[in-house]
Image (tube, rainbow, N blue to C red):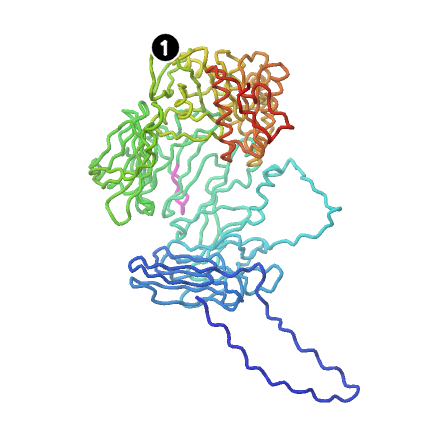
Amino acid sequence: YRPEPPKPEPAKPATAPAAKPAGEPKPEEPKKDDKPKKKADHRPGTEHIVRYLASGKEEKIADVASALWSKDGSALALSISTKDGAGDGVVVRRFGPAGMIASQEVAKGLGRYTKLVLTNDGGKVAFTTDKDDYAAKKPTPTLYLHSEGALKKIEAPKNDDGFIVNENTAPRFSESGRRLLFGIGPKAVEEKEVPDDEKVSLDVWNWMDPYLQPQQLLQQASERTRTYDVVRLENGDLVQIETPARENVQIADQGDGDIGLAVDNVAYRRETSWGDDATDVSVVDIATGKSKSVWPGLKGSASLSTKGRYIVVIDGKAERVYTIDSKTLARNEVTGLPTLFDELDDHPDLRPPYGSEGWTKDDAGFLVKDRYDVWLVDPAGKAAPRRITDGRIEHVSHARIDLDSEKRDVDLNDVWWLRFDEDDKRAGFRHVVNGRTVAEVPLSPKAFAGFQKARNADTFVYTQADIREYPDLNLTTLALNSPKKITDANPQIKDYNWLSAELTEWTTGDGEPMKGLIFKPENFDPAKKYPMIAYFYERNSDTLYQHRIPAPSASTINIPLFVSQGYVVFVPDIPYKIGYPGESAISAIVSGVNSVADRGYIDRKHMGIQGQSWGGYQVAYMVTETDMFAAAGAGAPVSNMFSAYGGIRYGSGLVRQFQYEHGQTRLGGTPWNDTLKYIENSPIFHLPKVKTPLLIMANDQDGAVPYTQGIELFTGLRRLNKPAWMLVYNGEDHNLVQRKNRKDLSIRLSQFFDHFLKGAPVPVWMSKGVPAVDKGRTMGTEIEK
């Protein structure tokens, strides 16, 4: 769309000026054209092409800065930016089955037109533009709404904070299009110019700050652009529903509901540093913006039903679930169910719930999960919960398959379930209609995922995989008739020494039953002796049938690569006892390694361990307690629980205290209250006992584990004259990002373990190192001559 430029006015004939009497004032200078011109940084749009798929015809549209289709495809909104600005504006084109049926210019004038948004049917369009203030050095954008043939300027409602319509959040319509939601915020503050030689750069830490300075610095951009939602109702009234004290409001029914739910931690942000999280829950009347408290100081979670009739509150501290009427705030405790909280969780914190599978039509019921089954709960509390799956007896868990992501309600008369056998890790899925299974893929040694139904056909695709079978797409009908593999993405598997995976079970010295995975080469010979590497991180046995792809290592050994090169890889599950993470790892891993070695095909003198992050810590701890491993690799390890407790996770700015008191480290207390536990679980205090050569990776831009933790570990071993190497990838994070670095790490991991577990020649970087003067000139990966 390019409107015709305005016609130039006809030139007037030149005439000689008349003589002026002496002493008469000089004539005024002709006025300059003060009409704003297009700014240098305001670029014209580009050519866009509309292609009609049925006919194959194409139509070119010039000077398009941005474009947006309505959800139903009937309207196309275009932001136009011409070279001279004369044609700038917003145009909406409307389409029918045969093509375009109308084009309407809804706004025009020199300026930028951004953040286009359309209702689903394309009947309304909203956008921001700086056309009203274009000549200003820093123009203030204005929000406009085009509805029912009229263009309306939308301003912020009166508020005590002096907030204005803010361009930092795009406007959006509710699902029906009856409401427009947009953000308001403070006016931008112009910073005073201070000469460089007078500028002071510092961070001021205050013990009462809600967040520590590192976190504030990372969040400052988002905080400066924070907005608070306003709803423009169907009658044109503007209602501010969010405030600085109530930052997050979820409106029911995709923006069309009468009720909103606010869940905010504003009053509890200091406590998040040590993991003592809480939120204030309130319900908001969308017509007035007024709120009522539902649950102050909740340690758990709260969510709104689809239509907004009920609030579900999960009280994690008491491990109870409630449904609350959003209008009367009457509470109903959900009872008569097995525990809805993770039975296997072993953190010193609230156990997470298994979760929900959605709501039925008109908020009549909601689905909650226990460890194995799904239950239908009456939110009004009149009927007892009803179990709708049959998993607990056979230890088979159930999760709903959402074939149609656009469908909001769960229809229990037509539902699909993904099933998983917790004991042997087989999976399957079934289609249940009116309570009866009408089609099923039985439990089998496969992993299934990627379910997606065709919009206009009774067919769907899914992936099916195991350790050898790549997760290609399979196409089938709703009756599961004749599933057909329709892709073949990794046929080269057949050209390589691949791997097998098996589930293994054993018992610890304390009599605790355990599970883990064993990966063997495809050409495995039980009569041979194989070097073995144990890799670990929490629990992994559920991934038995996951397909694993060879790739350069971001931090851990790549299992297909090492197995293909003749290693056996063992991956044990690790349950933890609070306060004793190191001892828990020793109990699970050592007993598991011994159980595999007892099978006769492992070379006990050539076994190694490797882990990253939490796994890296456990490697560092284990080499202080056992010498059964010939080599060990620890990526991003914590070596000193005391210094790590007060360290900063620079990726988020969070202090690490929460991780030790309530999180993954599982100490369950502070260094001053549980000093002995911090000493017992810190490898740094036990380094004299280390006899295993150790390879450490600690990257200087690690955003999770302080890089100095690796330095403490390395320099301690160096001081004790024990063999250790440390890889520091410059500018890299917790896990390597750059592919060149991943390839390099893969080479060094292979060389390290090959040397100690296979007797391969030592590379130069291990025997002599790489001096700083040679940095960049040589990588040291060549074999020493």
Q: Point out the residue furthest to the front here.
A: 785
Magenta-span inclusion, residue 326: yes
Tell me where residue 394 sits by quadrant: top left
Judging depth in this view, the residue of 453 and 668 nearest the camera is 453
Q: Hey, what amino acid is under mark 1?
A: Gly
- Work out which quarter of the rendered image holds the C terminus and state it: top right
| Span shown in magenta | 322-331
In terms of image quadrants, where is residue 33?
bottom right
Q: Nearer the viewer, residue 676 or 74?
A: 74
At horizontal 44% and vertical 67% (from top left) the residue drawn is 105
User: Would you say residue 672 is visible in this rendering?
Assistant: no
Dividing the picture into quarters, in which one does residue 550 lie? top left
Could you say where residue 22 lies in the image, as x and y percent from the top left? 79, 88
x then y, percent, for residue 44:
51, 61
Residue at the image point whose x is 38% and y is 50% from the top = 253
In this picture, residue 542 sits left or right of residue 33: left
The x and y percentages for residue 196 are 73, 47
Answer above or below: position of 655 versus 235: above
Q: Is residue 348 above or below residue 24?
A: above
Q: Is residue 374 above or below residue 13?
A: above
Q: Is residue 329 left or right of residue 695?
A: left
Near-viewer residue (93 or 42): 42
Residue 750 spot, x, y in % from top left: 47, 23
The N terminus - image quarter? bottom left
Count of residue discs = 1
Residue 751 lies within the magenta run: no
Report crowding for label 1: few under 14, some 14 to 19, many 20 or more residues within 10 A (C-alpha): some
Q: Is residue 121 above or below residue 263?
A: below
- Kind of element beneath mark 1: loop
Residue that numbered label 1 is attached to = 600
